[in-house]
Amino acid sequence: MTKDLRLAAEDEADLQVISAALQDAVCQVRDLAFLPSTRRFAMVLNRFRWEGEGKSRGHGHERVRAGLHFENVTAVRARNISQERPEGVLNLLAIRFEELNPPSGIVTLVFSGGAELRLETEALEAHLSDLGLVWETPNKPEHDLD
């Protein structure tokens, strides 16, 4: 049985680890929230358990509900994400960080179909936690590299 992930990021290298763990995670638009009063951006995703690949009893593939949040967020901008479609599904491909005026910078969450979220941060601070709900899936994300 794979243990729940608990990861934190305070620099670009740390964030790359979180990005790899969340590759191919899916969420709905309604699962995204910017809380300006606390300067926090939070989201809940269904994460593919890459680190547990082949260890489950049935199909060999698992997904787990996970929470991701960023602190010190001063603004959020969305591209190709419609707030009017809260049931819309987003497939996370990568998370990137561009340092502007250290320690501030831009976190970009890159989704399939050209969708993006850009978080302006005063300092990079991210936390990823599995929330315990795990289920088997027969589907493994595939990447066409052609």
Image: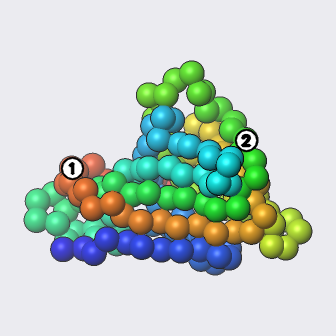
Q: Residue 94 in the image: x percent, y percent? A: 57, 57
Give the camera-side residue of 54 and 7: 7
Q: Name the residue under label 2.
A: 77
**From this viewpoint, which residue is outermost toward the front?**
37
- Mark-to-mark CA distance, 2 and 1: 34 Å
Of the residues shown, which amino acid type is indicated by label 2?
Answer: Arg
Left or right: 16 as drawn, with respect to 132:
right
Q: Residue 145 in the image: x percent, y percent? A: 52, 54
Give the camera-side residue of 58 and 7: 7
Q: Residue 72 in the image: x percent, y percent? A: 70, 61
Left or right: 35 as drawn, with respect to 91:
right
Give the camera-side residue of 120 and 63: 120
Q: In this view, does 131 lie above or below 90?
A: below
User: Could you tell me which residue is drawn at 76 percent across and 52 percent down?
Assistant: 74
Left or right: 105 as drawn, with respect to 42:
right
Q: Residue 42 in the image: x percent, y percent? A: 54, 52
Q: Is mark 2 on a helix, strand or loop?
A: strand
Of the residues shown, which amino acid type is indicated by label 1?
Answer: Pro
Left or right: 132 as drawn, with respect to 40:
left
User: Could you tell me which residue is drawn at 53 percent across and 42 percent down?
Assistant: 32
User: Could you tell me which residue is drawn at 75 percent across and 60 percent down?
Assistant: 121
- Confirm whether residue 109 shows in the render: no
**Rendered image quadrant of residue 133:** bottom left
Q: Name the residue under label 1.
A: 138
Specify which label sits upstream in the sequence, 2 or 1: 2
Q: Is mark 1 on a helix, strand or loop?
A: loop
**From this viewpoint, which residue is outermost toward the left?**
57
Quarter holding the N terminus is bottom left
Residue 13 is marked as none
CA neighbours of label 2 inside 10 A, class few (<14), some (14 to 19), many (20+): few
